[in-house]
Image (cartoon, coloured by chain):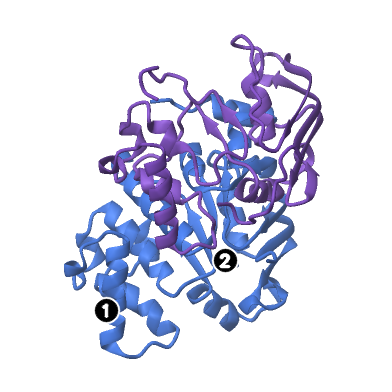
Chain colours: A purple, B blue
Amino acid sequence: MTTAQCAKPYGARVLAVDGLSKTFTMHLKGGVRLPVVEGATFHVDAGECVVLGGPSGAGKSSILKMVSGTYGVSAGSIMLTHCGQTQDLATLSPRQMMAVRREALASVTQFLRAIPRVPAIDLVAAGADPHLSPGAARDTAAALLERLHVPERLWGLPPATFSGRREAAHQHCGWFDLPVDAPPGGRAHSEP
Amino acid sequence: MSVLLECRGITKRFGTRVACADVHMDVWPGEVVAIVGESGSGKTTLLRCLSGQLAPSAGCVRYRLDGGALTDLAALDTATVRRLTRTEWGFVFQDPTEGLRMGISAGGNIGERLMAVGARHYGAIRTTAADWMEKVEVAPERIDEPPRVFSGGMRQRLQIARNLVTGPRLVFLDEPTGGLDVSVQARVLDVLRRLTRELHLAAVLVTHDLGVARLLADRMMVMKDGAVVEEGLTDRVLEDPQHPYTQLLVSSILTA
């Protein structure tokens, strides 16, 4: 569903995180340094679903934010392999990271920050292969929303009006590459 | 894909005052770059240097003219610059009265730019103008009314239509939602967001409003006292700001 449809042999290394650390420096609080992640090391292979467990504040989300480029990396490496090419996400330029997000990585978060006022179907279609025509992108989006059991009557509405199914719409089409940040947050258990 | 506009070491002095100092930036096709900072930070001066309206005191701006080689703007004659600003570039001013001709009709404002690139068939020009009014969500029935009878938000959307009708490759936006009420602002932003994506436009956006940058920009640069203090992916700059000034800006956002 992403731009480059390449084979991901089952078990092949997709992500290798090594010695990953993050420290925030709060300049407005007298330069206090806040270490939130220290030396995180793990890997994810194709076909695997890896859970980062731990109590609130343990740094789980910070790790995912470093992987997706929203946080900078203080130390360590994040090797992502996509289409036979391996690169260290910790060192990419903004434009290189934009390309990775377009082609190799998708994210879902419990903190829905969807663009306001944009209908769900367009939001999902925006994540589709940029080479698809607008019509084909909408078709792909429609198929995905259907698969996620989002009722069709909601497709034309912005997801802020949705219930627990909202993050389903938040998953852009390049879905299930990586990472997933606590997606069922705030969702009632009765909703599958 | 290759870089569309690049500037190297742009400095602009007004007398002894330095408005912007040693700025480097690249703009690639299809990306929206925001320049944020408070008033007086030099962002509008930089935008005017980038768009050829002001000659920098030092440094150079190069643009990939007609998709060919990168060309130094300073080396172009005025006729070429004028042609550029009417065809390959757009410039949306904060104040629509600067970017529109208030005495001629809405359709005339849009059609004028088409005629500047050689369109002559009146019926076709009128049809295209009406289409564009629809694209920016202004009722095409009002095609013969002058901009002064339109509301502020509609004028701004008309200005956007006038700029985009010739299919520019690069658009400069100077506080495009600056003087508008929030609800009206939202609609202008939606139109801009949709059109930049659909038309695969490159844009340089100047704003003091981080919310506007978050909504529209892929990358952002933060300016303070004429210098760029931080730049990067929009979400990275907003969620993991490094420079003390950026941290101050981000912590000053009012959350609704």
Percent coordinates x, y for residue B191 in the rendering: 37, 54
Q: Which chain carries label 2?
A: B
Give the CA separation, mark 1 to mark 2.
32 Å
Q: Residue A169 carries which label?
A: none
* Residue with the most extreme bottom position: B120
Frontmost of labels 1 and 2 is 1
Rendered residue at 57%/40% (across/down): B37
Above or below, A185 relative to B215: above
Q: Mark 1 lies on which chain?
A: B
Q: In this view, does B158 lie to the left or right of A7?
A: left
Q: B214 or B86: nearer the eye?
A: B214
**Disc 2 designates what residue?**
B53
Percent coordinates x, y for residue B230 in the rendering: 69, 39
Percent coordinates x, y for residue B193 in the rendering: 43, 52
> Dot 1: what SS?
helix
Above or below, A118 relative to B127: above
Q: How crowded is mark 1: few (under 14 residues within 10 Å), some or many (20 or more)?
A: some
Residue type at tag 1: Thr
**Disc 1 designates what residue?**
B127
Mark with earlier residue (1, 2): 2
- In this rendering, do the residues under marks 1 and 2 share a single chain? yes
Q: A25 or A8: nearer the eye?
A: A8
Picture quadrant of residue A130: bottom right
> Dot 2: what SS?
loop
Residue type at tag 2: Gln
Q: A84 or B203: nearer the eye?
A: A84
Rendered residue at 51%/43% (across/down): B213
Q: Residues within 10 Å of mark 2 (few under 14, many from 20)?
A: few
Rendered residue at 46%/72% (across/down): B167
* Residue with the most extreme front position: A10
Percent coordinates x, y for residue A69 in the rendering: 67, 36
Q: Can residue B129 be seen in this view?
A: yes
